[in-house]
């Protein structure tokens, strides 16, 4: 790797792999790292990756497909940053992993599924290789206007537009917004990828291109406020778009829902279920939104709320971050993150797992099927729970 990289991060990399404290609180058995839990090798832990990066910096190992697979197995959940005991450099840890992937992209040595992901975005504007006109398939017969001076743009994103479960979540969010008479519109066929996962997988130039095109489009249409379906788009719009010229206010739909409930714009009648909540990494650890989803659930009459063992800042990742939702590098076998997480949910005695991210809903729904517990546990978006409580 380049000398500048070595000088900038060398000391942090060395200290990290020598420490390993992030593993100790749970004595390894409950170590909150999705790729480590999936593979069980120290190489796939934060410290193990740092050891490899250190050797890479020092030219002790060469760039290889195996090295790339280990780096891309990181789900970008940010747990290593949260658990780190060194405040002076903990914020750098995710960036070091990101820069390793940037370097792999520059060298052209990346896993085939990652390469296919980038190609799909470049060719079709979405990772599903589907035509733009199918971006509005999720709407079905709903009367949702195209954005034209509304207070909010509802940004649905690729998963909400093309994935069956994502589409279900998008419709639920839209119906709640319509029920509350929120002024919003959509871009429809003009919507394009937000680029958050493109950036997290190291293709920074493609991310800048996508972001710049989106910002230009938003400004041309007069968008001032954005409601996002998923936390990934929320993260990109809020934390990375401003540096490229964006000045829009950005809200995740959960933030809007909490306000609607508090202002009595929607009044659920009741939902008599025991419910636990799964924190999405890009809503929680990346953006600090932990309480609003819980407040929403607690405001629904008759709903019994219970927490999983690992929750809030210590929540276990579903395994879909860092592009793994599309590449599936870490999600196979009994210890895949989504299956580990759904077993944690089952232990609570809840009959419903509430989610606020279409990635999470898809990952955990798949895990319920794989575990064979469809009759005991259901995965629902908070929007769908509100719908059922409102009897929409």
Image (tube, rainbow, N blue to C red):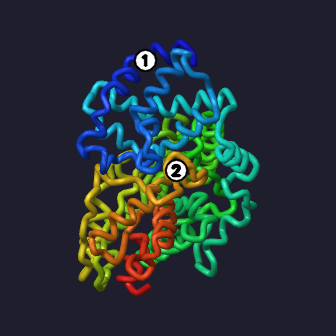
Q: Which residue is located at x 53 percent, y 36 percent?
A: 71
**How far across and down, in percent of the image, does residue 204 sit?**
60, 34
Q: Nearer the viewer, residue 104 or 169?
A: 104
Query: Circle 1 — which element?
Result: helix
Proximity of marks 2 and 1: CB atoms separated by less than 8 Å: no
**How far across and down, in percent of the image, does residue 238 sit?**
45, 45
Mark closest to the chain's N terminus, 2 or 1: 1
Q: Quadrant of the C terminus?
A: bottom left
Image side of residue 187 versus residue 259, left or right: right
Q: Quadrant of the N terminus?
A: top right
Where 311 falls versus 122 (above or below)?
A: below
Q: Which residue is located at x 47 percent, y 51 percent?
A: 234
Which of pointers 2 and 1 indicates the residue nearer the eye? 2
Query: Circle 2 — which element?
Result: loop
Does residue 204 appear anywhere in the picture? yes
**Distance from the alpha carbon under mark 2 to that under mark 1:** 27 Å
Q: Nearer the viewer, residue 318 or 232?
A: 318
Does residue 259 appear anywhere in the picture? no
Q: Residues within 10 Å of mark 1 (few under 14, many from 20)?
A: some
Image side of residue 40 versus residue 315, left or right: right
Where 162 falls versus 352 (above or below)?
A: above
Image side of residue 65 versus residue 156, left or right: right
Which label was assigned to residue 49? none
Which residue is denoted by mark 2 in the rendering?
330
The answer to which quarter of the image holds residue 114 is top right
Where 42 falls versus 173 (above or below)?
A: above
Q: Which residue is located at x 39 percent, y 70 percent?
A: 382
**How far across and down, in percent of the image, does residue 251 sit?**
42, 55
The answer to which quarter of the image holds residue 162 is bottom right
Which residue is denoted by mark 1 in the rendering?
10
Q: Which residue is located at x 66 percent, y 71 percent?
A: 137
Q: Residues within 10 Å of mark 2 (few under 14, many from 20)?
A: many
């Amino acid at each position: 790797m380049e000398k500048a990289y070595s000088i900038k991060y060398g000391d942090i990399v060395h200290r990290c792999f020598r420490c390993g404290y992030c593993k100790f609180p749970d004595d390894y058995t409950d170590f909150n790292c999705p790729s480590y839990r999936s593979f069980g090798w120290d190489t796939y832990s934060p410290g193990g990756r740092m050891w490899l990066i250190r050797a890479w910096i020092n030219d002790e190992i060469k760039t290889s497909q195996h090295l790339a697979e280990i780096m891309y197995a990181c789900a970008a959940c940010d747990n290593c940053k949260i658990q780190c005991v060194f405040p002076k450099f903990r914020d750098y840890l995710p960036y070091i992993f990101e820069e390793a992937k940037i370097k792999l992209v520059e060298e052209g040595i990346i896993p085939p599924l990652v390469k296919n992901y980038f190609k799909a975005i470049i060719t079709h504007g979405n990772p599903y290789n589907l035509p733009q006109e199918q971006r509005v398939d999720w709407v079905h017969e709903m009367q949702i206007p195209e954005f034209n001076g509304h207070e909010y743009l509802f940004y649905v994103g690729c998963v909400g537009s093309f994935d069956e479960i994502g589409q279900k979540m998008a419709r639920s969010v839209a119906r709640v917004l319509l029920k509350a008479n929120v002024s919003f519109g959509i871009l429809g066929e003009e919507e394009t990828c937000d680029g958050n996962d493109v950036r997290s997988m190291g293709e920074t130039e493609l991310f800048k291109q996508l972001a710049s095109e989106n910002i230009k489009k938003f400004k041309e249409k007069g968008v001032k406020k954005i409601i996002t379906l998923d936390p990934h788009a929320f993260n990109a719009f809020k934390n990375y778009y401003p540096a490229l010229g964006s000045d829009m206010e950005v809200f995740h739909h959960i933030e809007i829902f909490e306000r609607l409930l508090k202002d009595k714009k929607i009044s659920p009648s009741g939902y008599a279920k025991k419910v636990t909540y799964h924190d999405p990494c890009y809503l929680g650890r990346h953006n600090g939104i932990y309480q609003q989803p819980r407040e929403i659930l607690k405001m629904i009459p008759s709903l019994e709320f219970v927490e999983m063992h690992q929750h809030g800042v210590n929540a276990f990742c579903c395994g879909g971050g860092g592009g793994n939702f599309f590449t599936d590098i870490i999600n196979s076998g009994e210890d895949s993150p989504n299956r580990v997480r759904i077993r944690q949910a089952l232990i609570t005695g809840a009959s419903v797992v509430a989610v606020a991210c279409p990635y999470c809903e898809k990952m955990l729904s798949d895990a319920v099927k794989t575990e064979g517990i469809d009759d005991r546990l259901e995965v629902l978006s908070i929007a769908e729970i509100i719908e059922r409580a409102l009897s929409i």
